[in-house]
Amino acid sequence: MKPISIAALCTCAALTGALVAATLPAEGAGRTQARPGIDPAAFADPVANPYFPLRPGTVTRLRGTDEGEKYREKVRVTHHTKQIEGVRTRVVLDVVRRADGSLAEKTHDWYAGDRDGNVWYFGERTATYDERGHVESREGSWEAGVDGARAGLVMPADPRPTDAYRQELYRGHAEDQAWLVQNRATVRTPYRLFRHAVRSLEWTRLEPGVVSVKFYARGVGIVREKDLAGGSEVFEVVAVHHP
């Protein structure tokens, strides 16, 4: 299948606007993923997803910039779990620091794989910090089953171009969506060259005009992400430690 050109998509302002405002296709249309409810039994014997591994002890380090400021990010799959809607989710700690070492953001994410190999996102507890270490905001925090929030799909078991899905749904607070555009991408990072990566466009209606591209590599997860419209954020993986 011929890959979809990111340049062709994002040089058209009208199309970018349409992506951000779009409502996902109706359930059952194409391969769009939908899940009306969570069945804990489906998560009892999870199958590992190579594009979004959740092996405890794995540490991924990334470096990036946003609005001219440099950042370092450390993502650690912890040995901790959290029970949400009857599902034992894996706690992933994501810490972002400024170039001077000060804490910029700290997030506990909650993921779970199902028996088909899909990975689901059950929420996050997040906070951003100012240069003095004081909490600036906890906006974006949510938990599936609380206040109407619903778990979303973060990586299908068999990712294919044109797959589209909600990654999270907490109205007015967390509404990320994804559209897969390639599953045989090649991407080079400071860590190494990755082949057969999954490339997706991701956006939220809460930030109109902002569209990002992310690359997911086998055995690692996210290895590169970059704002294509409406922002300047760029992050790339620089090291991976497997237990």
Image: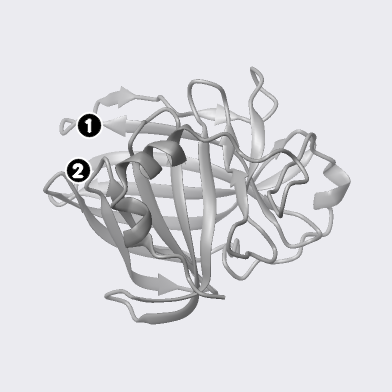
Question: Percent from the top left, x then y, of residue 154?
Answer: 59, 50
Q: Amino acid at mark 1?
A: Gly
Q: Amino acid at mark 2?
A: Ser
Foreground residue, 227 or 239?
Answer: 227
| Local secondary structure at mark 2 | loop
Residue at 25 percent across and 49 percent down: it is: 233
Give the answer, above or below, for where 140 lies relative to 233: above
Residue at 77 percent across and 60 percent down: it is: 46
| Quarter of the image with the N terminus in it | bottom right
Residue located beneath label 2 in the image: 102
Q: Which mark is residue 103?
A: none
Q: Earlier in the sequence, mark 2 or mark 1?
A: 2
Give the answer, above or below, for where 154 lies relative to 39: below
Report if the CB atoms under discs 2 and 1 are less than 8 Å apart: yes
Residue at 66 percent across and 58 percent down: it is: 156
Mark 1 surroundings: few (<14), some (14-19) or many (≥20) residues within 10 A: few
Foreground residue, 63 or 66?
Answer: 66
Residue 89 visible to the viewer: yes
> Quick check: 101 left or right of 224?
left
Foreground residue, 107 or 227?
Answer: 227
Question: Percent from the top left, x then y, of residue 194?
Answer: 42, 79
Question: Percent from the top left, x then y, of residue 191?
Answer: 32, 77
Residue located beneath label 1 in the image: 133
Question: Percent from the top left, x then y, of residue 206?
Answer: 42, 27
Q: Residue furthest top?
A: 147
| Local secondary structure at mark 1 | loop
